[in-house]
Image (cartoon, rainbow, N blue to C red):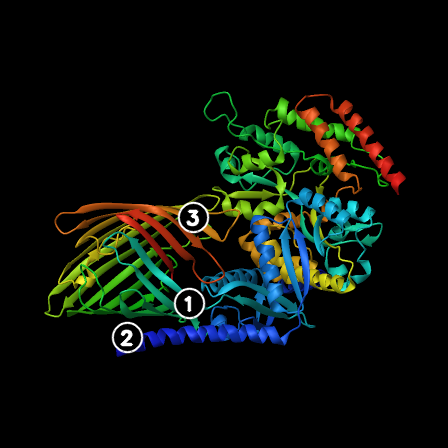
Amino acid sequence: MKKHISYLSIVAMFGIAILGLSSYNLFAKGIAHKSPIELTLWHSMSIYQENTLEKLIDQYNSMQNDIKVNPVFQGLYNDMRIKLSNAARSGNLPDIGQVAIEYLDLFVSRGYIEPITNDIPQADRDDILEQFWNGVTRNDEIYAYPFNQSVQVLYYNKKAFEKAGLDPNKPPKTWDQVIEYGKKLTKDFDGDGAIDQWGVLISLEGVFGFTPLIRQVGGEFLNEDRTKALFNSNKGVKIMNMLLDMAYKYKIMPSNWNLFEGTNAFLSGKIAMGPITCAGIKFAEENLPWELGIAPLPYIENKSVLLGGAGLVIFSKSARKRKAALEFIQWLTNKENCIKWHENTGYLPLRKSAINSYELKSFYLKHPNYKVPVDQLPYARPPDFTPYLPQIDQIIRYAIDDIMINRKSPKTVLDLAAEKVDELLAKNKEEK
Amino acid sequence: MRKPTIFMFFALIISLFLVQTLKADNVFLKKINVVGNRITKTSYILEKVTLEPGKTYDIDDLMDQMSIIKSDLLQTGLFENLYFDDQLDNNKNLILTIKVKEKNYLFLGPEGEIYYKKSGNPDISVYLEYVNLLGLNNKIKVSFPIYENRGLFINYRSDNQRKLIFESSVELKKLRSDPVITEDYLTTNFYLIYNGLSNFYNLGSGLTYNRYIDSAFILFPFIEFGSLKKPEDKDSWLYSRELIDIGYGENNDLIYGFSSNICYFKDLFLQIVFKIGVSFDYLDGDVPANLVLSNISRGYPAYYITGNKRISPKVELIIPLQWFPKLTISLFVDSDIIGYNNLRFIVGGGAGIRWFNRYQNPLIVDFAFGNGLEINFSKKI
């Protein structure tokens, strides 16, 4: 009995010691600090990106006691746009929102956001690359801090290359080479007449797929004043003819798959190569059953890639909260965190100091795929911004479907689309 | 005379240019700082750092070494993440700062197995574990049985020596109501593992002193090949552990045997890992009853079948949840062919959850069906 009691005492003592330590800790924290400024952050990061973002926010919340950031996932960019618009109407905007750079104009034009140009330290202005500031600048005023930024790169299946007798370390550099490679990579393995592996898929996702290609032949999507569509020029027609040839003349590409179908087909080995956002590199590297190859986006006449992604917008009107939000955002995008964000997601590093850091250079030794999108930065440009970009994007999607699936004349369809876009741009001019 | 002078002049210019070029690819490492370590000793971290302040490094070599150091430090399991910050002083000398974020090191929790069948007895313990003792990556775990049994289990593991790992454990159990083990017992184990010979294999040896009715000593040298963890650059990998037992009971009667365990892992896609393994065990002679070979299939109570020969094939599918990366589902089928002269076959199977939180090693809960339902819950040390 005596032994039994002494045994229980040891267990109880351990328990009391642990509880004592924990409660001391809580007590000490409770009395030592006033309540922090609470900030709500609406974001669009899911799966492993959300995990990385939450870890960073946890770290921020635990390293100081003045500001507490509460992240809330609000769906992908389009859902976020709708939720933010509704919240703006009902006056329930979050303190910080992650807004896709192409949707920023909606909130700027309606006066929901104040510029932060004068609040940005010169060191950040100098260190964050100009391309990224361009994505969040409207009429010379900065409206957001760049955060998750991406470009398209060419993903390719090294195993499929080897099987087709192609050197997996020599991916195609131009779209002409893509066609040549595609002919070798398109396979009907079981001979049933249905293609089992397509050579390539370029899913022209509206404005975002079309813009870099038209720029690669020296064209532009809209004019500089954003008053006229230019995508229906001969250059736009040339792009569409190239894609039609890939689908119908060379038969190396399915004609009616969207980006979602295309990405899934790539993951399951039914597509050998295709342009996909660099934000997927981490996921693809860790989850594909074959070795992933990443190459620069192929070009036609000159190199051009579209810069996409989102910025962090401060919606709060309270000066105290705006100051706190800015402090948090500056921490989240500092050199160390932008390296961590890049290494753990595939999104681009924002800062020159990060790109030149020994940390990233040593990281690239083991993960060379991550370096490819960074090398594309010198010729990366954001899309042609206008508040009507979501509507223009829909018009272009329908037009591309009409050309690729219904096989209508590219010139006729693009002219018709350009008329509709011009109407929207004229409306925008009137509203200004 | 004029021609050689011009030649020498150009040679000098070229060599100056080359020196400048070479110089641009080198950097002088002035200092290494370590920050963020609240528990882990800086000296322990620096032991893994192969760069030396005061030396000039070729940049490519520096990058190479940084990549290796990062990998070595993360492999200690002590850090959630680490980051190299570089700064150049006014003379363009490099000051490297290693910023570490440590994991939590103190754990308290229950572990054990609950077996639902008339004759089954729960075996539940409460444990206290500290995994960074003295800041040198030493682990100590103390656990106490809390149902029916009384006793104590202490495990200590030290791998602060770069290539030598020492592990010891003491297990004392009293009044266990078990059909096979009827007396109190005490088992002490000591292991030494040397992993400095190759990245592919480790050599080690263990010594057991066991006191159960009679005393016994068993020495078991072993060799380990491959890795249980996925190598960074491979989609399939092997692990094997080969072991020989040789010892004596109290009456100088011989104890002898061998154990061979081979596992093959294949990362199918989306980080879904298929694992197939088999172990062969033979242990004979004057083996104390608490060390005798027993079934290891989940779904059966311990010591459900005993024997001197055991073959245990296992298959397992480990599926991480993409939308909740901290959780992994495991589907498994275990089996044993076991006995003395008449071998018996049993098979069990089930599903488990592994929760990878910010603490070291996952929390494991397995539900196994065999001769009843068994629930295992543990956190690997």
Residue A190: image location, x then y, percent: 45, 24
Q: Answer yes or no: do the residues labelled 1 and 2 have beta carbons within 8 Å?
A: no
Q: Residues within 10 Å of mark 3 (few under 14, many from 20)?
A: some
Depicted B58 relative to depicted B278: above or below: below
Q: Nearer the viewer, mark 1 or mark 2?
A: 2
Q: Position of residue A407 (x, y in %)?
A: 68, 21
- Placement of the C terminus of chain A among the 4 image quadrants: top right
- Tell which circle, 1 or 3, labels the residue nearer the N-terminal end: 1
Whole-angstrom CA distance, mark 1 to mark 2, is: 22 Å
Disc 3 to disc 2, C-alpha distance: 40 Å
Per the rendering, the mark at residue B275 is: none
User: Identity of the amino acid at label 1?
Assistant: Leu
Disc ID at residue A4 = 2
Which disc number belongs to residue B108?
1
* In the displayed structure image, the side of residue A25 where residue A256 appears, left or right: right
Q: Nearer the viewer, residue B353 or A182?
A: B353
Residue B12 position, x and y percent, is: 68, 64
Cβ–Cβ under 8 Å for marks 3 and 2: no
Residue that label 3 marks: B329
Amino acid under label 3?
Ile
Q: What is the chain letter for disc 1?
A: B
Tell me the CA gap for discs 1 and 3. 24 Å
Query: For the residue marked with disc 2, what is the amino acid?
Result: His
Q: Nearer the viewer, mark 3 or mark 2?
A: 2
Q: Secondary structure at mark 2?
A: helix
Give the secondary structure at mark 1.
strand
